[in-house]
Amino acid sequence: RGLTPALERKEVDKSFARAKKSLTACYRKYFDNLGNFHKVNVGVEIAANGRVETVELLQDKAPVALRACVAKAVKRLRFRGKRESSEAHQLFMVLGKVKSIRK
């Protein structure tokens, strides 16, 4: 078996949707601590083996507890196949809605 192609946006969105309940719970639990933030922006590095390597909450003022909650939820995700290298994606949560974009 060879390597699989890069993940498509719809595949990433589908995988992130599996974590939507956990991510939304993190967002709602810590929303009061976010001040004027109305969306949470998360950078994710997906390893070549399909596991999430790193999770970075991209708001400077986000509480440590929110960062830990989001990282825990996202690191549980697995993505299909084996790729040549890791991939970077961004995840946006807006009032409980989840959407990703490829970096």
Image: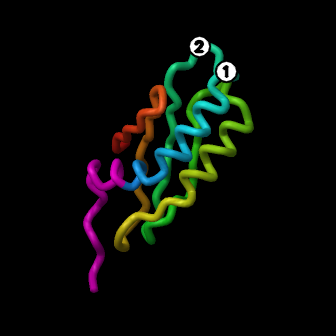
Say above or below: 83 vs 68. Answer: below
Q: Which residue is mark 2?
A: 36
Which of the 4 image quarters holds residue 5?
A: bottom left
Left or right of 86? Residue 55 is right
Name the spot of residue 32 as percent of width and height, x first. Answer: 67, 21
Say above or below: 75 vs 100. Answer: below
Left or right of 1? Residue 80 is right
Q: Please tell me which residue is depicted at 61% across the width and 38% down the height of the picture.
A: 26
Q: Amino acid at mark 2?
A: Asn
Q: Which residues are magenta?
A: 1-14
For the C terminus, which image quadrant?
top left
SS for tag 2? loop
**Viewer-nearest of labels 1 and 2?**
1
Q: Which mark is residue 32?
A: 1
Q: Please tell me which residue is depicted at 51% across the width and 45% down the height of the picture.
A: 21
Left or right of 75? Residue 87 is left
